[in-house]
């Protein structure tokens, strides 16, 4: 009798592995028709999922969780889905847990450890701030994907990320080289040492090397969503109307900014250039096509899963992996307008 994997179920249903994971975890954010279709195929294939199979067979396979913080961000969703794909054939069972970007991923890990006995975690979109103290007593392997955590006081924490400081530098230097001086940065609340603070420090480095000082009044905190970028831009530009460029720390935020600028009668890039970060697929087809830093989803996912499995299955020590990203120069950035 064929033993079906979660990937087999996804292929038969014509959906993503993430969607199957949502159905298996009884998530409410699944279209009812899709849920019924997936459940029908699950029943037909007698699929119980690796975690259930483990408990039925009393095997020693591990259960790990991918905790996605910021479920409205398509980059993070694509990354988490790719992780499930990369892990589909491993002997470790992976589950996917979605939480809002305002929720606490570390308390979520603590809860999953108690409720489901997860033995390892990958944090996607996690921010290693003071909240991480709740993990100090958890002696389990964990990987932070997209953020470097070499200085964390957590013994079994690895990380896989791009060089955010260098890439923040590259983004803002590109805008400076185009003649922009009144540059705004749209990001989140800055926590020392996280990936967003590194991008911000890279931006400051670019200003410093150009003999300039960044105007802190042009830093705008925003949620990492289309609406977040849109609402923030609508609040920001009436106050700072002389801004000619925006470095947004996510593509979806950048797209929200562009929509807001259009609604305010400003042209992109003729009046205001907009630079994103992440390299999501939608950016290639947006109008205008989005200039961005493209993070390598497949590499980030593959390395994150490999590092966690190595720690879980082989008892390896934590390690910190840096992967390369690419600047994609497209239509949303142009030379600064003549004053």
Image (cartoon, rainbow, N blue to C red):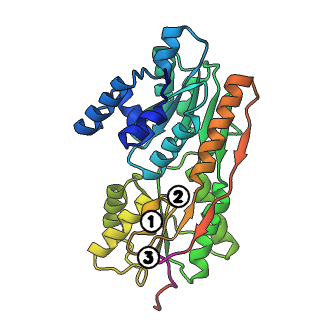
Secondary structure, magenta segment, majority class: loop
Q: Where does the magenta region start and end?
A: 330-335
> What's the CA distance linking mark 3 and mark 2?
23 Å
CA–CA distance between discs 3 and 1?
A: 22 Å
Picture coordinates of residue 126, whole percent (x, y)? 52, 40
Nearer to me, 224 or 210:
224
Disc 2 marks which residue?
Answer: 278
Local crowd size for mark 2, using a 10 Å CA cut-off: few (<14), some (14–19), many (≥20): many
Residue 184 locus on image (x, y percent): 48, 68
Residue 88, by quadrant, is: top right
Using the image as rendered, state which of residue 259 and residue 135 is in the foreground: 259
From the image, tell me which residue sits under label 1: 283
Residue, far bottom: 338
Q: Residues within 10 Å of mark 3 (few under 14, many from 20)?
A: some
Report the side of 65 relative to 320 (left or right).
left
Does 30 appear above or below 196? above
Where residue 134 sits in the image (x, y, percent)? Answer: 54, 24
């Amino acid at each position: 009798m064929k033993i079906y994997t979660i990937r087999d179920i996804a292929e038969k249903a014509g959906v993503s592995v993430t969607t199957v994971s949502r159905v298996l975890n009884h998530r409410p954010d699944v279209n009812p028709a899709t849920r019924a279709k997936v459940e029908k195929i699950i029943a037909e294939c007698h699929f119980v999922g690796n975690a259930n199979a483990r408990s039925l067979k009393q095997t020693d396979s591990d259960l790990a969780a991918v905790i996605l913080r910021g479920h409205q961000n398509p980059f993070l969703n694509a990354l988490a889905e790719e992780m499930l794909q990369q892990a589909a054939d491993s002997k470790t069972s992976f589950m996917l847990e979605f939480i809002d970007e305002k929720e606490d991923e570390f308390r979520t890990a603590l809860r999953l450890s108690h409720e489901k006995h997860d033995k390892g975690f990958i944090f996607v979109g996690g921010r290693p701030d003071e909240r991480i103290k709740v993990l100090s007593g958890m002696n389990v392997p964990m990987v932070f994907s997209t953020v470097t955590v070499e200085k964390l006081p957590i013994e079994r924490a690895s990380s896989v990320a791009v060089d955010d400081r260098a890439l923040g530098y590259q983004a803002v230097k590109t805008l400076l080289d185009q003649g922009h001086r009144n540059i705004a940065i749209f990001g989140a609340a800055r926590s020392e040492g996280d990936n967003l603070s590194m991008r911000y420090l890279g931006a400051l480095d670019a200003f410093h090397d150009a003999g300039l000082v960044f105007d802190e009044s042009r830093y705008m905190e925003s949620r990492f969503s289309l609406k977040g970028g849109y609402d923030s831009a609508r609040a920001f530009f009436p106050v700072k109307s002389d801004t000619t460029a925006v470095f947004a720390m996510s593509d979806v935020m950048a797209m929200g900014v562009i929509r807001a600028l259009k609604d305010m009668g400003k042209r992109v890039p003729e009046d205001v250039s907009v630079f994103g970060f992440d390299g999501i697929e939608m950016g290639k087809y947006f109008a205008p096509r989005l200039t961005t830093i493209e993070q390598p989803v497949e590499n980030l996912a593959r390395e994150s899963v490999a590092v966690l499995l190595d720690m879980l299955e082989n008892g390896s020590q934590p390690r910190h992996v840096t992967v390369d990203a690419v600047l994609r120069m497209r239509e949303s950035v142009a030379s600064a307008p003549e004053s």
